[in-house]
Amino acid sequence: MKKSITYFISVILVFSFFLSCNNQKAETDEEYIATINQWHQERVEALTQEDSWLSLAGLYRLHEGIQSLGADSSKDIVFPPKAPASLGTIIFQDSTFTLNVQPDATVTHNGARVGELVMQSDHQGEPTIVKHGSFLWYIIERRGNYYIRLKDTHHPNITSFTGIERYPVSKNWRIKAEFKPFEEPKLISIPDVMGEVFQDTLFGILEFQIEDETFTLAPIGNPEKDDEFFIIFGDQTNGESTYGGGRYLYADIPDKNGITFIDFNKAYNPPCAFTKFATCPLPPAQNRLPVKVTAGEKMYGK
């Protein structure tokens, strides 16, 4: 009898142990899903800010010499209709950008009205931002060319934004990856939506498996200096349920054993999915996966 009771208690204890493990696993999965949802909510909130990608209203190539600014169609750089007909000129000479404001136009920098201002581009550091009404603009450099990037803090895209559809969050898409460094860094060619190609430094590849099949991705970032890798990737959902130009994600720099995780639940749309005025890099040839990655953000507005 004692033996039967002891056996019965043992069975109960073993069952309780496995039940406890299963409950702990369920809680862990729930916490993971909550973490991904929180990350996505913060991303959505960032997109609704006045100076987000949704506020982009123009991208204008600058050329050497004097260029006029304003909403009038005769201007060299034509702003949207609600801007003044004439705002002034910008002079691009010897890598210097000088803004001259029309006397009857109110343009400010750091809250103070300006008449003439030398503007710094993002190539030189933090770009100089100037404002008129709901517009703000600054100068960016891309592949040796300079542009005025214009934003409208009251852009209709912001008020009409209702979020981004996603695939269901699944821990199966948080995939272990091994970083395989090169003996010497290599160059990687990355195309962009403007039809240009630029090169970056590649220190190695990430190797991982999806359904027992091995794949690789080429991450941008220095594992000795950076905290994260930046990954531009494409897959077989592009143009179908996800943005045709691929998606982006970040992954932690690998640990001392060369291990990190690629969390495709955090795959997100590039700025070009929201506006035609962005200058997005596209997936390099090495990063076009021949499988469907059914995780992360779907095509915006579909």
Image (cartoon, rainbow, N blue to C red):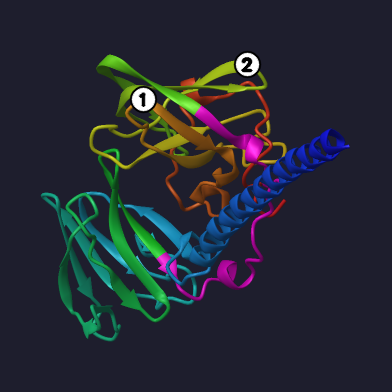
- Which residue is identified by label 2? 213
In the picture, which quadrant includes the N terminus? Answer: top right
Which residue is pictured at 74% across the width and 38% down the height?
14
Q: Tally the numbered discs.
A: 2
Taking 115 as reference, is 31 left or right? right
Q: Is residue 174 magenta?
A: yes
Q: Is residue 7 magenta?
A: no
Q: Residue furthest top?
A: 183
Q: Along the line of sight, which residue is nearer the eye, 252 or 290?
A: 252
Element at label 2? strand
Specify the amino acid type for callout 1: Asn
Question: Could you classify mark 1 by the number of other residues whose Cα lies within 10 Å: few (under 14), some (14-19), or many (20 or more)?
Answer: few
Question: Could you classify mark 2 by the number of other residues whose Cα lies within 10 Å: few (under 14), some (14-19), or many (20 or more)?
Answer: few
Element at label 1? loop
- Which residue is identified by label 1? 257
Residue 260 spot, x, y in % from top left: 44, 32
* Range of magenta residues: 151-176
Q: Is residue 176 above or below residue 183?
A: below
Taking 224 as reference, is 220 left or right? right
Whether residue 255 can be seen here: yes
Q: Along the line of sight, which residue is nearer the eye, 63 or 245?
A: 245
Q: Residue furthest left?
A: 94
Q: Return the disc, 1 or 2, that comes first in the chain's sequence.
A: 2
Q: Residue furthest bottom?
A: 104
Residue 137 spot, x, y in % from top left: 34, 66
Specify the amino acid type for callout 2: Glu
Residue 92 spot, x, y in % from top left: 18, 55
Q: Residue 50 has which mark?
A: none
Residue 165 spot, x, y in % from top left: 69, 53
